[in-house]
């Protein structure tokens, strides 16, 4: 009647994670720094300068995020 399934179905990737994170060569996660979009007048120059570019995520946060990208970021 029905053909038996041979493989597990593919897992879905959270599409927001694909846009917001990148993997480094060693497998760590990079992300843009929060707090850089608006209301920057109230922040001092040191805050703005130190939050320029991207940062490596902490290990505890990266563990959760990697659950959302089962096949990696390709």
Image (cartoon, rainbow, N blue to C red):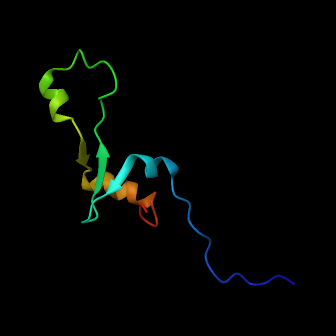
Which image quadrant is residue 72 in? bottom left
Q: Residue at x 48, y 46 (%)?
A: 16
How many marks the image carries: the answer is 0
Which residue reaches farthest left? 46
* Residue 74 image point, x, y percent: 43, 63
* Residue 7 image point, x, y percent: 62, 80
| Most foreground residue, 70 or 18 | 18
| Most foreground residue, 67 or 34 | 34
* Residue 6 image point, x, y percent: 66, 84
Task: Decide if residue 5 is on the left or right side of residue 63.
Answer: right
Q: Residue at x 40, y 46 (%)?
A: 20
Up the image or down, 49 lies above or below 29; here it is above
Q: Residue at x 83, y 82 (%)?
A: 2
Q: Residue at x 24, y 15 (%)?
A: 41
* Residue 68 image point, x, y percent: 46, 57
Up the image or down, 46 lies above or below 5; here it is above
Task: Decide if residue 42 is on the left or right side of residue 46.
Answer: right
Which residue reaches farthest right? 1
Up the image or down, 21 lies above or below 34; here it is below
Task: Decide if residue 69 is on the left or right side of residue 52.
Answer: right
Q: Quadrant of the N terminus?
A: bottom right
């Amino acid at each position: 009647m029905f053909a038996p399934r041979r493989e597990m179905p593919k897992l879905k990737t959270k599409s927001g994670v694909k846009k917001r994170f990148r993997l480094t060569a060693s497998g760590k996660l990079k992300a843009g720094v929060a707090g850089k979009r608006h209301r920057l007048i109230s922040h001092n120059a040191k805050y703005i300068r130190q939050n320029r570019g991207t940062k490596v995520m902490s290990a505890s946060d990266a563990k959760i995020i990697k659950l959302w990208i089962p096949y990696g970021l390709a």
